[in-house]
Amino acid sequence: MEEGGATARPRRATGRLCSTCNQRKAALKRPKTLEQICRECFYSVFEDEIHNVIMDNNLFKPGERVAVAASGGKDSTVLAYVMSELNRRHNYGLDLFLLSVDEGITGYRDDSLETVKRNEIEYGLPLKVVSYKDLYGWTMDEIVKTIGLKNNCTFCGVFRRQALDRGAALLKADKLVTGHNADDIAETVLLNILRGDIARLSRCTFITTGEDGPIPRCKPFKYTYEKEIVMYAYFKKLDYFSTECIYSPNAYRGFAREFIKDLERMRPRAILDIIRSGENFRTATSTKMPEQGTCERCGYISSQKLCKACLLLEGLNRGLPKLGIGRARGTNGLNKRVEQRNLRSERTGSNIESKQCGTLDF
């Protein structure tokens, strides 16, 4: 989604006039439409499309506090810049903040956070940083040292999602916006089909999610191509961090990403078509969907007695890192085994207290 991929310099269109204004020389070919277009018109259509998405979907209301998830990568950097510009230009009336998560990955996240701090000054947006170490008692470096490179993305994804919600709660934010782009959403549709994950498939194309949770999440870049985000950042000379996470080269999502890129090369509209297909999927009435509840330990949203983060932490703190790894449908048994172990530990007086998954109660 963020730092890796699509970092090549944009292809310049030469010798033709802009197809939009017919006045200036074309500087690039839009990946989404293949139009020959000048820089000025590209900036305009790029920003106008995002503005139209925001307005058509009523993403914000005047006076809302909005946290912008900022990693320092291209997506979140362009998101922070464009949100700041549109908020000022169209008078959204939003109170914007930058929110970053420090996963504790030496030589990667510490460097990208320096980029976010520079953006904080340049864009004039206050920054809040929350860390895995403070919230969970572990850094990703420590987790990878314990479990190895396999399944480390599972831990990071679960912890990061909850860390963003907890950081947004600290900021008293009404909404959280993320830089998920059209490529990311198309990848997610494909992954959920491959996994047979009906519950996630039914909601992964929503532009706003988590409305039944602590803080709604919005995706203004839902229909924005990753290549166009790179072009915008390149021509605007935005300061962003472009190194891929050192722990993610073998992530399962990477294979879906390569497939989507192959489709885009053959037919640029393929990305939007996959998203439209996802939007039009209907879940059969006979399909049993998980019931949303709250974690008994930390109060975070969960369809089980213990949320995924608490299960993963339970395993880490007890020296059983594989405890919370597996498909969601098997977590009922995991919850029961955790409860049984806790009861046995209490009877013998040797209970090892797991660190609650976060220092905030929802």
Image (cartoon, rainbow, N blue to C red):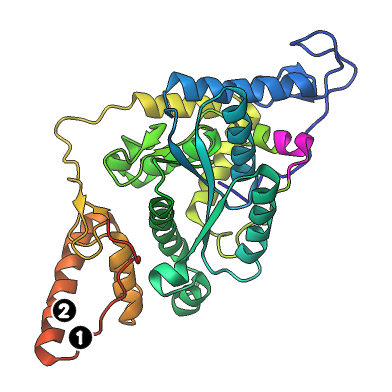
- Residue 247, relative to residue 301: is it above or below? below
Q: Predominant secondary structure in magenta?
A: helix
- Residue 189, relative to residue 306: is it above or below? above
Q: Residue at x 43, y 35 (%)?
A: 64
Q: Quadrant of residue 190?
A: top left
Q: Are marks 2 and 1 in contact (CB under 8 Å)?
A: yes
Q: Name the element at disc 1.
A: loop
- Residue 28, relative to residue 10: is it above or below? above
Check residue 350 for magenta coloring.
no
Quadrant of the frame with the C terminus: bottom left
- Amino acid type of the residue tagged 1 in the rendering: Asn
Residue designated by label 1? 351
Q: Quadrant of residue 287?
A: top left
Q: Name the element at disc 2.
A: helix
Closer to the camera in the image, 310 or 324: 310
Closer to the camera in the image, 219 or 188: 219
Q: Is residue 116 left or right of residue 291?
A: right
Residue designated by label 2? 342
Q: Is residue 30 left or right of residue 69?
A: right
- Mark closest to the chain's N terminus, 2 or 1: 2
Marks 2 and 1 sit apart, C-alpha to C-alpha, by 7 Å
Residue 235 horizontal/vertical position (percent): 78, 34
Question: Bounds of the magenta span?
Answer: 231-238
Badge 2, how many Cα within 10 Å: few under 14, some, many 20+? Answer: some
Q: Residue at x 25, y 81 (%)?
A: 353
Toward the right, the furthest residue is 15
Residue 83 horizontal/vertical position (percent): 58, 34
Q: Is residue 12 left or right of residue 167?
A: right
